[in-house]
Image (cartoon, rainbow, N blue to C red):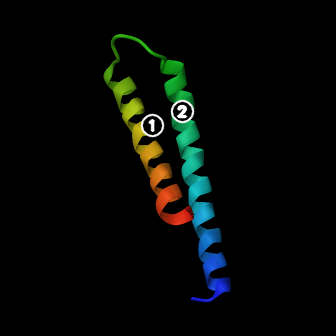
Amino acid sequence: MTQEEAINILKEDLLILSDALKWLLRSFKICKEIGIKEDFNEEEYDSLETLASRFARVSDILLQKIF
């Protein structure tokens, strides 16, 4: 692999990371409004699960593709 090819792959991976971060921030804003409490309804659980999933995706992209 040439240096130019490696740079192009990194650029593509950074775009993927940027898109994933956009969705993670969206989920974070939704969950921040839910707050911390004793009981959650089904929709709130779904939102929290989505946040956790998107956080895991961003973490995977960072560790496996960027670093």
Q: Determine the residue positioned at 62% across, 62% down.
A: 15
Q: Position of residue 40 (x, y in %)?
A: 35, 17
Is disc 1 surrounded by few (<14), some (14 to 19) or many (20+) residues within 10 Å?
A: many
Q: Is residue 10 above or below residue 27?
A: below
The kind of secondary structure element at disc 1 is helix
Q: Which residue is mark 2?
A: 28
The answer to whether 58 is drawn above or below residue 64 in the figure is above
State which quarter of the image contains the N terminus: bottom right
Q: x, y percentage for residue 7? A: 66, 77
Q: So how many labels did they put on this image?
A: 2
Left or right: 4 as drawn, with respect to 49: right
Q: In what element is the residue under mark 2?
A: helix
Labelled pair 1, 2 in contact (Cβ < 8 Å) = yes
* N-term-proximal mark, 1 vs 2: 2
Residue that numbered label 1 is attached to? 51
- Looking at the rendered structure, the kind of residue marked 1 is Leu
Please, what is the three-letter code of the amino acid marked with disc 2? Phe
The image quadrant of residue 33 is top right
Q: Position of residue 46 (x, y in %)?
A: 36, 32
